[in-house]
Structures are given as C-alpha cells and as structure tokens.
Amino acid sequence: MAERTDGATPDAGASSQPHGQPVVVCDDVHVEYSVLATGKRVDKGSVSGFMQRRRSMKKVHALKGVSFIAYENESIGVIGTNGSGKSTLMRTITGLTPASAGAVYARTRPNLLGIGAALIPDLSGSQNIILGGLAMGLSREEIEGRYDEIVEFTGLQDFIDMPMRTYSSGMSARLKFGIATAKEHDILIVDEALSVGDKAFQRKSEARIRGIRERAGTVFLVSHSMRSIRDTCNRTIWIEKGVLRADGETKDVVAEYEKFK
C-alpha cells in the first residue's frame, strides 16, 4: 500500500460521483501468487511410477486490474461469491498483501477488523480490552474512559472477567468488534464481523458503522448478507473472479448480483 501526500490521485475509473475527499484509490490493482499444485506423473513400465505425484507451482491471479476511488462519508459494501477476491482486495488495501501490479493510495492507514483476528485466549475479556486498546494506540486513560461502554455494547457483562478460551466464537467476535470500533477510524474495513451474534447485536453493529461513516469515516463492509449490505452501505462494489464487475448504488448492484447468483 502507498500513501500519497501530494493531493493528486490517479484516474481509477470509479463509478460514483465525488461527494467528499478521496481517501482510498485502487489504481489497476493486480495480485498474483503461487501455490503448490499436485498432479499425477505416469512413468512408462512402472506401476509405482503411475502412483507417484508431482508437485508443481500454480499461478493464481486473485485480482485482475481492480480500480475505484472511495470517498469520505461512504459505507461501501464488498460482495462476491466465495473465492472471488474480496478478502484479497481488502488485505491489499491495508497493505497486508502486496499488489503485483498497479497501486493503492490511502489518506491514512486503513484498519482491518476481521472475525479471524486473534485475541489472547488465556487472558480475560477485560484484559483483552486493555491490550487491544493499547495496540490501537489509545492511552490507558482513554481505554478506562471507554471500558464500560465497550462491555455494555458487547453484552458480555457476566463473562468479561472469564478467560477468552471459555468464550464461543460469537462472543469473541462481539468483543473484538466492540474493541476495534471504540476508536475513531478514518478508514475501517469490516470483514464478515456482522454475521455473528443475534439480530439485536447485528443492529447495534450496523448502527455503529453508520455512526463511523457519519463522522467523516469511510467503511468497507465485506459480507455475504445482502440484508446487512442493504441496511448499512450507500455504495457497493461487486468482485467476481478477481474482476470488478459492478460499482454503484447498493440497491442496483445487489439486485444485479442476486440475479447472477
């Protein structure tokens, strides 16, 4: 990921009209990587050779020239079938996965919130709130000032002093979401975090994302739930087989995607 400070942005071909300052620009982004592929090799006259397997490298072209501009105050849904390249795109925006070609420009470093992010299982939920806040750059005083609100938001009051290893995956994801969104983010990427918890928690999570957007933040929401996308996002991009297939108003892109599925 590259951060640009001269105020200029390349022509990324975004479909949305500007309604604020650009905060993320993806300019013809490609991501290719190699994986091991196992195939059978047949040696003439050898039964054992027939059963031998040959390992070779296979190129995967995960993103194929993706371009768009994201603006402040936008909540952008990211949709596509499994393996379409959604998470690869988000990891490239955060700088966790390097682009093989093209470039990503960001006003500030994006923060990735995914349900796979690790908490420390042997520590309590309370201790994880403190460590998570410190890791995000909050002071001890700031964490203490937001501690009660985080616990109340997650609904884990009865479990907050128990070790994280006793939590269900949904409880862990709720706590992580509460910690990560306790800080103001300029650019926040949420990967499937709204799919956990009951409907009441999902509504609270969606409301918090809208609040981040209204405070001039930009949110990317990766989800298979079209209800969450419709309720939360004012713009949606559709990635399919590494290609940006659609980018526009959520209702139009989701309708097109549902016809495709």
Image: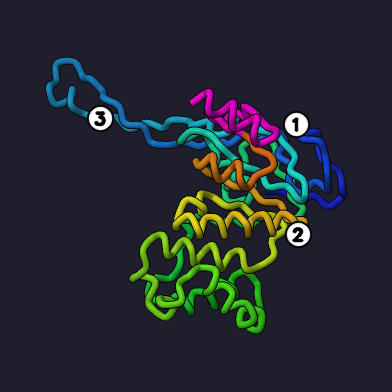
Task: State how far apart marks 3 and 1 are (Cα).
Answer: 47 Å
Indicate which label's residue lies in the foreground, 3 or 1: 1
Kindly check if marks 3 and 2 are in contact, taking CB atoms under 8 A apart as contact.
no
Q: Residue 176's spot in the image, x, y percent?
A: 51, 64
Tag 3's secondary structure?
Answer: strand
Indicate which label's residue lies in the foreground, 1 or 2: 2
Determine whether 80 is above or below 220 in the image. above
Tag shown at residue 215: 2
Indicate which label's residue lies in the foreground, 3 or 2: 2
Which of the two discs, 3 and 2, labels the residue nearer the N terminus?
A: 3
- The answer to whether residue 32 is seen in the rendering is no
At 67% across and 54% down in the image, what residue appears?
A: 210
Determine whether 64 is above or below 126 in the image. above
Kindly check if marks 3 and 1 are in contact, taking CB atoms under 8 A apart as contact.
no
Q: Residue 65's spot in the image, x, y percent?
A: 65, 30
Q: Who is closer to the viewer here, 9 or 77?
A: 77
Q: Residues within 10 Å of mark 3 (few under 14, many from 20)?
A: few
Q: Residue 19's spot in the image, x, y percent?
A: 83, 43
Task: State how far apart marks 3 and 2 are (Cα).
Answer: 56 Å
Please give the residue where the numbered disc 1 appears in the rendered image: 15
Q: Who is closer to the viewer here, 151 or 16?
A: 151
Please give the residue where the numbered disc 3 appears in the rendered image: 53
Q: What amino acid is found at the position of numbered circle 3 in the picture?
A: Arg
Magenta residues span 238-261
Judged left or right of residue 141, residue 46 is left
Which of the two discs, 1 and 2, labels the residue nearer the N terminus?
A: 1
- The answer to whether residue 117 is seen in the rendering is yes
